[in-house]
Image (cartoon, rainbow, N blue to C red):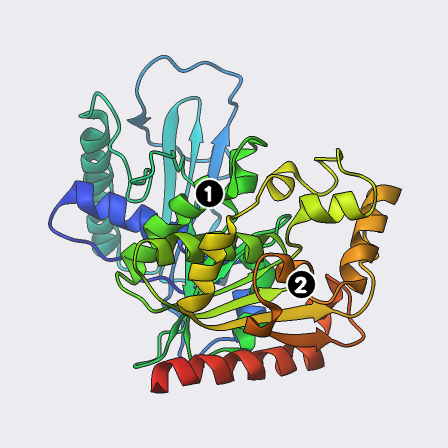
Amino acid sequence: MYPVELEIGDDLGSSISNIKECLRQVPNKGIGYGTIFGYLEKALPQVSFNYLGQFDQGTSATGFWSLVDVTGEYGLDRSASSEEANDNVIDVTGLCFNGHMCFNIASHLSLEETERFKAVFKMKLEQIIEHTLSFVHPQKDIKESTSTGMAVDHFEPYFEFHNPPGGAVLFILPPGEGGAESYFNNIVQQLTQFKLVLFNNYYLHLKSPQTSFEELAKFYISYVKQIQPKGPYNFLGWSFGGVLSLEISRQLVGAGEKIDNLIFIDSYFNVKKACSAINQADEVDIIDRINYFYSPKAADMKQLVSNTRNIVLFKAAKLNDTYRSDNQLLLFDYYMKSDFNNLDTLMDPQSIKLFHLADDTHASWVKNERQVTSMCNSISSKLKQAVGK
């Protein structure tokens, strides 16, 4: 179970939006929290609420929902023995069936207190239903659209971990085939001295191959600015996320901002040039066309280098052993044998601090605890320099 405090304000509409936004920020829907972080020894509240979802959706329901009194149906009945075995003071179970919202409330309170609780519960639920149905068009929730004009469509943009006083903020961008969860069991566990903002993968969410890194960067910058209005900024990205970090940083520097740390984990740069080098110049989908067509201007890269304190590349020492074609394997072999994953074709290699991921491939480092510790020690050192400068 993932602990969440739901704040209820005086305004019902704002409370609904705030709660939805709060729940969207729960990492990985709360799955695995206890295993990863454990729980305090303090006893949990003895109140349970379980919504079972919608049933019999093949049956059409033309009217609005209404509350019904259901006993002994849809698995909501309780025997005396089951109630005695339940340690919860209040246990609420609900479902939606044929357009009707049904609840069973079991409690160890007195009969009078239980009846009072049921009456208030029903009243509050009716108020929420009435409020929701009062809008001809649904209210947009927080972060459902951005200044870039790209619709968020219930996308969870980011998760936040740790928030120590005076610590640096590190924005972490996702790999191409994953989201924020890619870092939960490695980097998040070790960089506890800093506020971490882990972005999810909007490119995967969009499912639009025509999207460019330039467009994605504008989308993410709108959130970066909400969290940290002014630089200098710190970015980290693995693979696809590293290239995205580069473009975000380029745009921020172009707008007059500074970058403290720009950290790449085995990202593949200048894919078009790499394809030409392996005689596959026209293979635009060899990784993903968004990578192939990304080609920042030399003047922009020079400006970026001039306004960035540290540029760090963690480079895999072993061949990426996960590939979908022979040509892709050729490309991975090219990058493994290159000095800087073609980052040196975009900027002066003297500006790049290189760290080799000994004995690891493009993907294996995430499960190598020793490697992750070494990487996080280096990252931590850079972030502390940024805070103490």
Of the numbered discs 2 and 1, the one sitting upstream in the chain is: 1
Instruction: Please name whichever residue, 283 or 345, is drawn nearer the observer in this view of the structure.
Output: 345
Quarter of the figure with residue 45: bottom left
Q: Could you say where residue 88 lies in the image, as x and y percent from the top left? A: 41, 62
Q: Could you tell whether 311 is left or right of 104 in the image?
A: right
Q: Amino acid at mark 2?
A: Asp
Q: Which quarter of the rendered picture does the C terminus lie within?
A: bottom left
Quarter of the figure with residue 108: bottom left
Q: Tell me the residue that label 2 is attached to.
A: 266
Spatial separation of the CA atoms under disc 2 and disc 1? 20 Å
Dot 1 alpha-carbon crowd within 10 angstroms: few under 14, some 14 to 19, many 20 or more: some
Above/below status of 386 relative to 84: below
Res 158 visible: yes
Mark 2 and mark 1 in contact? Answer it, CB < 8 Å. Answer: no
Q: Could you say where residue 80 lies in the image, as x and y percent from the top left? A: 46, 52
Q: Which mark is residue 214?
A: 1
Q: Could you tell whether 327 is left or right of 138 in the image?
A: right
Residue at image coords 84%, 49%: 329
Element at label 1: helix
Q: Residue furthest front?
A: 299
All told, the count of numbered labels is 2
Residue at image coords 21%, 48%: 15
Element at label 2: loop
Q: Could you tell whether 118 is left or right of 271 in the image?
A: left
Q: Amino acid at mark 1?
A: Glu
Q: Could you say where residue 331 lies in the image, as x and y percent from the top left? A: 79, 50
Q: Residue furthest left?
A: 10
Q: Could you say where residue 170 lies in the image, as x and y percent from the top left? A: 43, 69
